[in-house]
Amino acid sequence: MAILPIIWAPDPVLKTKCRSVDVVDDEVRRLIDDMFQTMYFAPGVGLAAPQVGVTKRVIVVDVAGKDEKPQPIALVNPEIVWRSDATQIYEEGCLSLPELYADVERASHVKVRYLDRDGAEQKIEGEGLLAVCLQHEIDHIDGVLFVDHISALKRNIMMKKMVKAKKQRAREQAA
Ligand code: GNR
Ligand code: NI
């Protein structure tokens, strides 16, 4: 298992519509294991494959609280099959947009069909943070970031901060 480097925006890999997985094989299971390790280390409540540079339709989530038992869920080829008309607003963050947060409105309840790590078809229903997280991660494999749901003005300010932060990091790494 390995902790993988997380890619920061702006980066073309985060804008890519990812490819479906044909077969859930050992290579995909290794990716899932590495993604869980990377997500728990970060720490985060979700992670999508393009955030670690892999343009495949694979996401992992665990929205259990600190004192709760872990609830890891790996979803291959996830597809939202139903979303509620009712919406919720949640202050989102993203490991690919470190230290940036914004309110995003999404469906408050979703049903998602996916393949589990054994390749078996499963369905999951989520509300609250799980619904937010499933939609945020499925956006990632379609090349969409949470800032794509806010006003262009706010998005431009945030992306300028990201360009600055990346330049600063490049300077630090060169030093
Ligand atoms: O760790 C994360 N927290 C979070 C908080 C509110 C809404 C969405 C998220 S997902 C984020 C991890 C991440 O970037 N996943 O892609
Ligand atoms: Ni994210």
Image (cartoon, grey):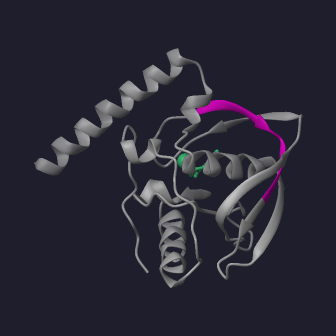
> Which is nearer the eye, 172 or 15?
15
Q: Position of residue 42 (x, y in %)?
A: 48, 60
Please report the residue visible at 39 percent of the width from the left and 58 percent of the height from the top.
53
* Residue at image coords 89%, 34%: 86
In this rendering, would 16 be left or right of 45?
left
Res 153 seen here:
yes
Q: Position of residue 158 (x, y in %)?
A: 45, 27
140 to 59, vertically: above or below: above
Can residue 44 be seen by looking at this rendering? no
Is 106 covered by the magenta stretch?
yes
x 52%, y 47%: residue: 17
Front in this rendered view, residue 163 or 48? 48
Q: Quadrant of the N terminus?
A: bottom left
Asked whether 1 or 69 is in front, the reply is 1
The picture quadrant where one finds residue 104 is top right
Q: Is residue 129 above or below residue 165?
A: below
Residue drawn 31% across the image and 36% down it: 165
Predominant SS along the magenta part: strand
- Find residue 12 and report its image quarter: top left
Q: Is residue 10 left or right of residue 119?
A: left
Q: Position of residue 140 (x, y in %)?
A: 56, 47
Question: Residue 98 lies in magenta, yes or no?
Answer: no
Residue 89: % across, % down:
75, 32
User: Which residues, given as a range, are shown in magenta?
Assistant: 102-112
In this rendering, the answer to whether 53 lies above or below 41 is above
